[in-house]
Structure formats: C-alpha cells, structure tokens
Image: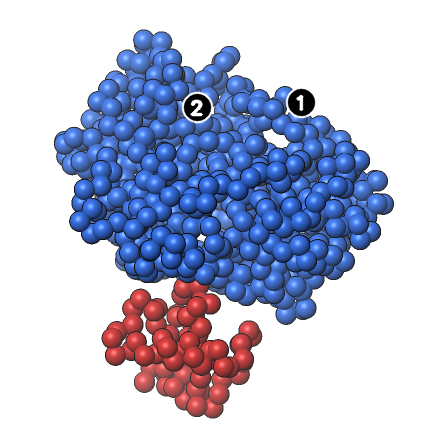
Chain colours: A blue, B red
Amino acid sequence: MSFNVADGVLKSVRGNSEHPYTRGRLCSKVNDYQNRVYHQDRVLHPLKRLGAKGSGRFRRITWDEALDEIACRWGDLIDDGRAEAILPYSYLGTQGIVNGLTVADPFFNKLGASVSERTFCDSGASTAVTMTMGHGRGLDPESFEHSKFIVLWACNSLSTNSHHWPFISAAKDNGATIVVIDPARTRTSALADIHLQIKPGTDLALAMGVMRVLRDRDLIDMDYVGNYTHGYERLENKFAAIDLDRVAAVTSIPKRAIEEFAIAYGSNRPAAIRIGVAIERHRHGGQAVRAIASLPALTGAWREVGGGLLQITLGAFPINWSRLSRADLIDGDRRVINQWLLGRALTGELGLDPPIQSLFVYNANPVAMVPEQQKVQQGLRRQDLFTVVSEHFITDTARYADIVLPATTQAEQEDIMFSWGHFYVTYNHRAIVPRGEAISNSELMRRLAAKFWPGDPYFTRSDEQQILEALDWDSPALSHSSLAELKAQGFIRLALEPPGSARPYAHGGFLTPTGKCELETTLAGNGDFVLPVFRQGYDGNQSGDPVDSVPDCSELLNETRSAEDLLQIISPKEHNFLNSSFANQRAQQKRAGKKQVLIHPNDAAKRDIQEGDRIKISNPTGHFIATATISEKTLEGVAIAPAGHWDVDDDGTVNAINAATFADLGRAPTFSSTLVAIAPIADEEVSLVDVA
Amino acid sequence: MVYIDPDVCIDCAGCIPVCPVDAIRDDIEVSQDEEHWLELNRARSAELPVVKHKLEPLISGVAPTIALDSGQ
C-alpha cells in the first residue's frame, strides 16, 4: 500500500503498482484506509469507564493514570500468586511482525499470565498440513499461472484473496479449467468453469471419493506414491470401498459430477489446489485438509511447475519466532486457554482455578467474532473482572472495558510484514505522526514492561531493533538482500526458485518426520496439537485429543440427515469486512448492506418468509435477528450469514448461535456444522425479543 | 467506450485514479442523476468482449487526454 501524504495528512492510499504480486490493487476493505485513520470515532486518548459495563460511557484519563491502574491491578494478582488469572486476548486486527501476532507474548510469558491459544484462522489446516506435507513453502501462488487445472476449494478468491486472481485468470486465458468447490455461489464461482456446490462439512467425503475414482481409473502415480509418500496402503484401505452413491448423497454433488471432477483432476496437468480457511470449520475439517493435501501426492501433481497445493505461505519466511514469542520466559507448567472458549472461561463454566480476573484485549473484537456471543457478553459484565482493551474504536468489546487505550493504525507505525498469501516481505513505513495519544502495540508493551521490570534490555528494544531482529537475514531465503534494500524498495521476494521453475516437492523432500508426504501421519501418537506460533510459542499443555492417523470418512458417510425443520448455517467473510475490522466504516457498510441471512427459496417458502422479512435465527446456543435475503446462491437446507457486523446489542449477530466446540485437528472451530431454526418474526415481536 | 460489470467488479477502486478522463465513479458515490449508468454498465458489459489488456486509446479518447495533460 502506498500512502499519499500532504502536509502531514494522509490524503489517500493506493496499491503499489511496482509490486509484482499486488500490482497496484487494493481490496474494498482498505482502499479508503485514510477514512479509518481519520474516522470520527477514533479513540485518541486513554479512557476510563464511567457507566455500567457495556454502556460505552468513558472519561479521558492520562497515560500515566491508565498504566498505573493496570500495573496496580495486575501487581495485586501477581503478589497473590494468581498471575494466571490474567488472560491476554488477541489476534490479527493489526498485522506486522512487530505489532501483530506475537507483540505481547514475551511480556505475558514473563508476567506469568495464562497462555492464550489463538486458533482463529487456519490452525486446523496448519496442523493437518504439518501432519501431511510439513509446514513448508508449498505451491507458489504465482506458479498458478502455469497450471492447466485449478481447484479453488473453499476459497472465494475474489473476495478474500483477490491478489491471487490475476494469476488464476492468466492460467484460464492459457486454457486452464477453473473449478470452485463452495456451498455458495460466489463472485469467484461465477467466473469458474465448474462449480461443485457442496454441502458444508462434507469435504472429507468428497476428497476420499475422488481418491477412489483416481484409483479405479488408474490415475494414481504409483511411482510418485512409492518413492515419496508414507502409508499408501492404509489410506487405500479407507477409500477403496467407498460407496460413491453415499458420497453423492452426503455432499449434494451428483455422482457423475464427482467422477468427472476426479478424472479431470487426475488427467489434466499441471493441477493446482488452493484451499481456503473455511474448509477446517467443521467436525471433520482437519482430516478433510489431510485428505485434500494428499491428492497432489497421489497423482504426482507435485512433479510439475504449477502443480501441487497452496494453503498459506507463512512457512517460507525465515522468522525468528523464538526471539519474538520468548516461550523460554515460561518457567515450568503454564495454563493454556483456547480463545474460542472465552465465554465459558469468563462465566466460570470451565471451572478455572484461579478464575480469570483480568482480560487484556488487543488486535481483536471477541464480542463480534467469538462464538457463544451472549455468554461472552455475560462474562464481560462481571463486576470483578478488570478488562483493558487497546483499540482504534469503541468496539462491541471495548464497550465493556474498564480502561481503553488508543492504538495506532498501520499508517502511524513502523513495521515489517511477512505474508500469509505470497512470498514477499514488505516494509511498513510510518506515514504520519500518530493521532492524539495513540501508540503502537510495541510501545504499549515497552511502557507496561517498564512498570514491572524497569530497564530490562529485552523489553526496552526500539522498533528499529525489533524490525532488525524479526527475520533471519543470513538465511538462504534472505541473504541476497538486506533490511536497507527492503526499506528503500518497500518489498523483496524471498530467494526461492522463481515461480516459472519451482517444483518444491517434485522429488519428495517434504518437511515431515519421514521426509515423505505422510498419507498416514507419524505425528498422531501424542494426539492433537496446535502449532506453537498460535499459542505464544508455548508447546506445553496441548489438548492431546485422539487423532486418526489416516483420514476416514465412514462416520460422515453413515450420518443420518438432521431434523428436517433445521437448517445448516455457515458464516463466511463479508466481502467488505476483514472479520469485524472495517465494519464500522461508511463505504464498507454501504456496500455490505444490512445484517442479512441468505435462505434458499424453497426453505423460505416452507417457513413463509418473504424477501426483506425480519427473521429470528435460533438454536440451543442462542439467537440473533437479521433480514432475510431469498436467493438461489445457497443450497436448499443451508443458510448463509456473513460475519463481522457490529452493534451486537442490536439483536445479536451470527456468533450468537455458533458454539465453542472444536474440530478434529488444531482446535479449529465448527461453525459450518451449526444447525438452526429460522422463523419470521412479526414487527411487534421485535422489540420484545430479549437479546441480553 | 468500456463498461464495468457491477456484478463482477470487486470494488477495488484501482481503476478510478488511472482513468485518464476521470470517467469512473464508485457505485456508492454516484448521484441520483447518474444512477442510470449502473444499469447501462450491467447491460453493455454483458454484450461486449472482456478487455484484459491495455489497448491503444481510440481517436476520440485521445483529445480529452491531451487536454487534461496540458491542464486545459
């Protein structure tokens, strides 16, 4: 992103047209970023709560007052031997290696607080990929240009990965077939050659059905399998006898379409798969990713440039994680609390000892984005809970804070960025002086640490020093360049093979214990785990839940239909929001429209729901109210509620009905397994519905 | 003339500053008397071939570009 600054004011932003990957484009979330920076609702000074929790009434205080109170409250807990009663809570509302994912980890690891396990996004897939391919570089997103068959599996590229689209589009111009596998008709499926409209949560069955067809049609590359995979026979035992009629019934995809897809995937080369985040969000999500990640090894797709699978590109970056998270500051055993369980943790349902007495939220808006929304709000109302929120705005979460701290935007801070979706490092220059008294997360951690360990050399490091230490500049991926070059140019590509010749696993070399693609994983022995990068660098106290070493879809195929009157509901990203970020901005709100739920015409007719009706969506977890949009974009039996809307107090949002339960791998959520009843509500009933 | 399919457009707004004759508006910024352009864009974009690469400007498009460049 290029900032256009005049007289110290950020006038506009643009994509950097020199950047080979982003090519001057920005998505609709951030292409008016100046409107976020200068938004009338920006928090510009530290605030202290005035009214009742959740009322959103505050008064201005000084930074000294704010920090003194925080230090005093936390000091009391620590002196009392209850440091674990403090819970840091964050994710990626701010990106950047310095100010993003790990910024507060060293502080809280040293303080003795509970470790927060952040499995918001792709943790399940990351565990699955680690078990199958190893968490390395995977397929270069730029190599897709050379593909002849591209599968976008649970990935709406044009809404959530738009910079990848030109490479897919170029492949299409060269004759590639584009297949989209998605329960919904999306912007991306509209431009695809084939759309397999799959019932949510059944991807494991489809992937294993594809395996069976590949074998029956002799499309498995037995030479590749023999040399570079582990456990083929055990996997074959699982898929050889799969009943394709059952796969068709469960997935809602006709048997013939499944067969044609499998044959096309196995016989068109190079064949690329791009998986999206939603794929992990159901009970079998982890094993679904394991099965899909096995496909390119079964067909030998890795042999060719543009063949293989892309999940996330994180593994390619030489990031000094241990220096960033400082898990070494955890002495002995430390309590880990998964962040999806926030509502249960705060309300006492988890039976925590000591209970959570203080919550420190930054880079996150859990009231909007965490399941069991009403329970989260109930927990945040606790009078004995001391909540601190560092934010740009008074979000639905910040409304409950005892202290709100003003945070800088990307334009007001310096940082260095890895990418989740390409192989370039980016430098984030500070473009303008921070507004008001806003400070960066890194500065916040320096100020907090000074209260507890004044003069500690690690916690007094400048941003410049932290930026220098963020990456290993001596590693093969970066030794060709330097921080000075990065600062001058704004971006550099990692020194990997060029996308036009990259064949990362053409000759095996997977980053697994066996060095092979592990169709049968050798990592199931200790049970389920979350990669330490998603849990403050800490590897202790993993869940260890039992894991099947080979994907198995028999349970899924034997599932009986849910009750006829219930609908499955999914909560995908809204095109204009990044989770709840940007959902309070005018342009994004105007494009996104009202909080709505898409329902198939047949489901609407059965419930006597008309377009634009107010409807109540409910299940045992909770309920929310939204506007009905009747559309054939969704399957019969499946409702779609885009996530991210604010003003939760106004009838709740989709996270009111999502439960805090876990998928089979990496503590991913199960949002796509959610069932709900949907009914119209009469106008007079709206005001009577109790959402508290 | 080039038209934008409002159903395919992802609202990245990348085209607005590079248009030499300042002819492109964000759909949420159009005034009431400009609203008919939305339907016209939808209809015409469906009929015409997709432009994927930069083309030479038409003769009629050159004149205003020159005028803008010289500040007239």
User: How dense is the environment of label 2, judged by Cα within 10 Å: few (below 14), some, or many (20 and up)?
Assistant: many
What x and y, as percent, mark residue A112?
41, 17
Outermost residue to the bottom: B59
Question: Which residue appears at 32% of the width and 9% of the height?
Answer: A79
Badge 2 element:
strand
Left or right: A687, with A469 as reference point: left
Residue A455 visible to an observer of this rendering: no
Q: Chain of mark 1?
A: A
Whole-angstrom CA distance, mark 2 to mark 1, is 23 Å
Residue designated by label 1: A525
Residue designated by label 2: A337
Residue A177 visible to an observer of this rendering: yes
Q: Amino acid at mark 2?
A: Ile
Question: Which residue appears at 38% of the width and 16% of the height?
Answer: A351
What x and y, as percent, mark residue A170?
62, 66
Q: Amino acid at mark 1?
A: Gly
